[in-house]
Image (cartoon, helix red, strand yellow):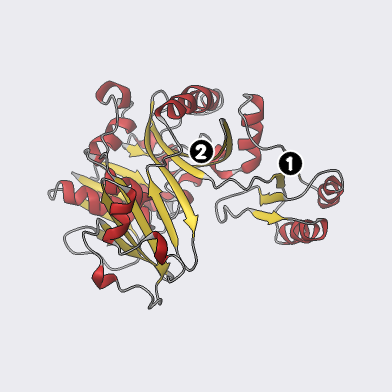
């Protein structure tokens, strides 16, 4: 099959690598200006927001299927245009994906559907937002509304700090902010795949910032099967139903950032692709045909052809360190499942029957945290 991946990020490259690994007969193209990777993918120098040129490439090169990992492509309406042309594509339309791009829309939908989320306020005027600070308890979190270029949440412990951050956000051209209550619980990331009607869990991930490095552990031991079923019934399906009231059904990856405190679950944010290096955790445990899952989803046959996504019963452990760090000798690592890097970080993932077993493959033990 001739496949185009619209994106130039880590997700695009690892999707290509995994699909090619499962079936070497596929011809894969990626919209990037980087050098082609021999025997994996061919790079085509097309900008991710140039939807007409991407459409022309698909048409004249007889591309059979397109996978979108680029948020820029999604918000610029690549799925909308492809559907008009009749080109098969795995991506949500720009309207259906608004919940993943605008915090204000996400919060309003959560509030409307009575889905638990931290208490929040949405403000489009600086003076009103600052006045609101005088009535609430600290610490709080401040985020900009439009998340395409930043999912950053700023924790503010004092009025003066919060006031300064609000002024900065409005000065940089943002016209809306969200202020919400802060929780010191470590967030958990949960990803689902959906064709707009059926949805299935992909992976649950815990993330930790350690002394000089970051780590990802999947699946999250804090998320049980009962919690997954609760999220499907009380969060995912109500939101998918609500989306179809104003747009095409949501087709693609739908990620959640949540906090779990005792038995209470709160939803913080939504994503239309794997964040950061989360894709490492998913691919390290996937024991299923990735392309078939994606194409069946795009064709509305996720529930018809799959009863679950087949994942290994192992744990995956991902280590993210600074690219220039000399504190860890990666030559000593054993059985690395996935390895990648960008301009800042090197990332390694191993999997084993236990978390400690996966850590040991990267020579990481609890007693070594401070040393690293």
Taking the view exactly as shown, the residue that stands out farthest to the front is 367
Up the image or down, 365 lies above or below 301; here it is: below
Please indicate, yes or no, whether residue 323 appears anywhere in the rendered image. Answer: yes
Of residue 21 and residue 91, the one placed in the foreground of this image is: 21
Please indicate, yes or no, whether residue 58 appears anywhere in the rendered image. Answer: no
Looking at marks 1 and 2 on the same chain, the residue that comes earlier in the sequence is marked by 2
The residue tagged with tag 1: helix, strand or loop?
strand
Up the image or down, 306 lies above or below 1; here it is: above
Residue 216, position in %: x, y?
41, 53
Q: Which residue position is annotated with label 1?
A: 122
The residue tagged with tag 2: helix, strand or loop?
loop
> Crowding near pointer 2: few (<14 within 10 Å), some, many (20+)?
many
Of residue 331 and residue 262, the one placed in the foreground of this image is: 262
In percent of the image, x 66 and y 40: which residue is there? 104
Cα separation, mark 1 vs mark 2, equals 20 Å
Is 355 left or right of 209, judged from the image as shown? left
Q: Quadrant of the N terminus?
A: top left
Residue 241, position in %: x, y?
51, 22
Numbered tag placed on residue 97 in the rendering: 2
């Amino acid at each position: 099959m001739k496949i185009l991946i619209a994106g130039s990020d880590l997700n695009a490259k690892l999707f290509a690598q995994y699909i090619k690994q499962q079936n070497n007969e596929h011809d894969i193209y990626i919209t990037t200006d980087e050098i082609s990777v021999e025997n994996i993918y061919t790079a085509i120098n097309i900008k991710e927001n140039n939807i007409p040129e991407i459409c022309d490439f698909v048409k004249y090169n007889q591309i059979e299927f397109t996978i979108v990992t680029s948020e820029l492509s999604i918000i610029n309406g690549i799925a909308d245009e492809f559907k008009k042309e009749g080109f098969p594509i795995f991506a949500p339309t720009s309207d259906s994906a608004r919940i993943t791009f605008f915090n204000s829309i996400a919060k309003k939908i959560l509030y409307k559907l009575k889905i638990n989320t931290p208490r929040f306020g949405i403000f489009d005027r600086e003076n009103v937002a600052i006045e609101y600070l005088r009535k609430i308890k600290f610490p709080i979190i401040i985020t900009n509304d439009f998340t395409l270029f930043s999912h950053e949440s700023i924790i503010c412990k004092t009025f003066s700090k919060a006031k300064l951050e609000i002024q900065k956000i409005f000065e940089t051209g943002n016209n809306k902010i969200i202020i919400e209550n802060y929780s010191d619980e470590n967030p958990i990331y949960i990803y689902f795949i959906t064709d707009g009607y059926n949805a299935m869990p992909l992976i649950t991930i815990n993330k930790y910032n350690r002394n000089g490095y970051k780590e990802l552990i999947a699946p999250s031991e804090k998320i049980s099967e009962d919690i997954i079923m609760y999220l499907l019934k009380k969060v995912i399906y109500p939101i998918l139903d609500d989306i179809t009231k104003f747009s095409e059904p949501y087709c693609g990856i739908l990620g959640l950032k949540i906090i779990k405190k005792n038995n209470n679950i709160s939803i913080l944010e939504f994503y239309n692709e794997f964040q950061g290096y989360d894709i490492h955790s998913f691919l390290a445990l996937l024991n299923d045909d990735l392309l078939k899952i994606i194409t069946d989803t795009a064709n509305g046959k996720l529930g018809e052809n799959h009863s679950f996504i087949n994942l290994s019963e192992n744990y995956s452990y991902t280590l993210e360190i600074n690219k220039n760090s000399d504190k860890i000798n990666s030559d000593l690592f054993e059985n690395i499942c996935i390895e990648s890097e960008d301009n800042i970080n090197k990332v390694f993932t191993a999997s084993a029957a236990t978390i400690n077993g996966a850590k040991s493959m990267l020579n990481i033990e609890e007693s070594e945290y401070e040393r690293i």
